[in-house]
Image (cartoon, rainbow, N blue to C red):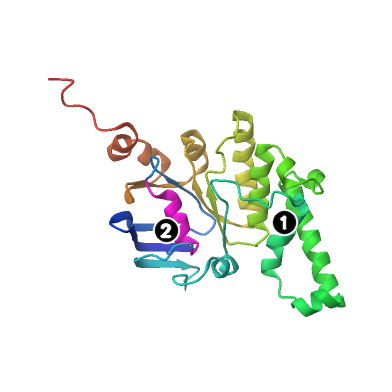
Amino acid sequence: MTGILEVQGVSIAFGGLKAVQDFRLSLREGGLQGLIGPNGAGKTTVFNLLTGVYRPDSGTVSLGGHNLIGLKPHQIARAGMARTFQNIRLFADLTVLDNIRIASHARTWTSTLASVLRTPGAIAAESAITEHAMELLDVLGLADRAQETARNLPYGDQRRLEIARALALDPEVLLLDEPAAGMNPQEKIALRGLIRTVRERFSLSVLLIEHDMGLVMDLCEQITVLDHGTVIADGSPESVQGNPRVIEAYLGAPSAEVSA
């Protein structure tokens, strides 16, 4: 069965360094899949390839059967794929609400002239954007902070705001790049529930990069493992957890000298 996101044979090199080699992935519709691997394995590079930040040297990427190769990031976002970032990239000096409203504008088609002239159509579109933004903030538990400046939010709430901003694009596929990074245990528990809620509420397919193995094993139905830019395992959490190549990638090969 073909997934909503299909990646086949994707590779990229920077100079002489092969950062990603023959990467493959199939994300089923409605699925929640993990992409894991040691530091420097190429995970964020894969996200950059999927979202048009980098163009692969070879391979194919398709979303809902439509080829994404050669599209710019904003075109891929409009096609139905949104992402968060490992390092938070909010509009720090704008309000929480305006962070969402700006993202929502990417999905509207009101002309600049209509916006300047404040035509009835433009006013209606702005009202709809604000209403949708408040609905998202309510789902993410941030509605009471709508008028606060984004930089003043606690760290965990900034992570939530990034997810809300990505959802404002009405994506079919949501890419989460280490959403639990820097969170305390209580925030991680809340995040686990939030990701499940968001997937069901918005009928999303989710691809997740995360270093917290407890979170990954609990959340994800399928896991793909990268090491040095190459897929070394792909399967259920149970099969991946016990895979010798995965254990070696994280812990290192056992030393033959120890038993000598």
Q: Nearer the viewer, residue 238 or 143?
A: 143
Q: Residue at x 33, y 59 (%)?
A: 13
The residue pinned by badge 2 equals 26
Q: Is residue 3 visible?
A: no
- Compared with 183, 23 (above or below) is below
Query: How far is mark 2 from mark 1, CA to CA?
Result: 30 Å
- Compared with 202, 114 (above or below) is below
- Total numbered labels: 2
Magenta span main SS: helix
Is residue 47 shown in magenta? Answer: yes
The residue pinned by badge 1 equals 100
For the N terminus, which image quadrant? bottom left
Q: Residue at x 38, y 68 (%)?
A: 60
Q: Nearer the viewer, residue 194 or 248?
A: 248
Residue type (three-letter) at the residue carrying disc 2: Ser
Is residue 104 shown in magenta? Answer: no
User: Judging from the image, what secondary structure is the residue with disc 2 in?
Assistant: strand
- Compared with 96, 240 (above or below) is above
Residue type (three-letter) at the residue carrying disc 1: Ile
Q: Residue at x 73, y 46 (%)?
A: 150
Disc 1: CA contacts within 10 A as few (<14), some (14-19) or many (>=20): many
Residue 251: x %, y % from top left:
32, 31
Residue 40: x %, y % from top left:
38, 44
Labels 2 and 1 touching (C-beta < 8 A): no
Q: Magenta residues?
A: 41-52
For the C terminus, which image quadrant? top left
Q: Residue at x 49, y 33 (%)?
A: 214
Q: Is residue 19 visible?
A: yes
Say left or right for 183 vs 232: right
Q: Earlier in the sequence, mark 2 or mark 1?
A: 2
